[in-house]
């Protein structure tokens, strides 16, 4: 199981994390599964898979020692 971070920068965010821990954990697993299938994700495409914060989920995965190649791309529109 992927471990999530357990501290946020303010009490409101920390409460939100505690209330949604299982949901966020399942989002990490979903992101990892998509990556292992060779999918590339954007924040918008991840949202369509039910992942609400792709950057945070990728960081959670990295913090668990799993290497992730990532690249920020700016939309040209």
Image (cartoon, helix red, strand yellow):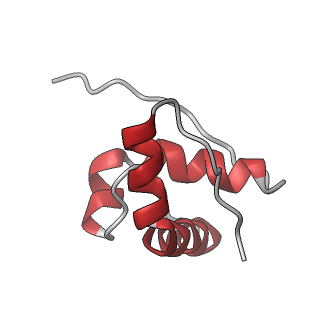
**Label total for image:** 0
Query: Residue at the location (35% across, 24% down)?
Result: 74
Which residue sits furthest left? 77
Q: At 38% across and 53% down in the image, what residue appears? A: 16
User: x, y percentage for residue 54?
Assistant: 44, 50
Residue 67 on image: x %, y %: 78, 51
Q: Is residue 41 visible?
A: no
Q: Depth check: 36 or 5 in front?
A: 5
Q: Is the residue 4 above or below the residue 58 in the image? A: below
Residue 7: in sight, yes or no? yes
Residue found farthest to the front: 11
From the top left corner, tell me how far across and down residue 15 is, in percent: 42, 52
Residue 32: image quadrant is: bottom right
When the figure is inspected, residue 28 is found, relative to residue 68, above or below; the finding is: below
Q: Position of residue 36 (x, y in %)?
A: 64, 71
Q: Residue at x 44, y 38 (%)?
A: 11
Asked which quadrant contains residue 12, the reply is top left
**In the rendered image of this protein, does residue 68 appear above or below residue 26?**
above
In this rendering, position of residue 4 left or right of residue 65: left
* Relative to 14, residue 17 above or below: below
| Quadrant in which the N terminus appears | bottom right
User: What quarter of the picture does the C terminus occupy?
Assistant: top left
């Amino acid at each position: 199981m992927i471990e999530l971070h357990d501290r946020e920068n303010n009490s409101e965010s920390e409460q939100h994390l505690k209330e949604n821990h299982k949901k966020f954990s399942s989002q990490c697993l979903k992101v990892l599964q998509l990556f292992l299938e060779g999918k590339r994700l954007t924040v918008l495409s991840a949202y369509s898979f039910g992942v609400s914060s792709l950057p945070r989920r990728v960081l959670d995965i990295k913090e668990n020692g799993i290497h992730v190649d990532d690249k920020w791309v700016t939309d040209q529109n």
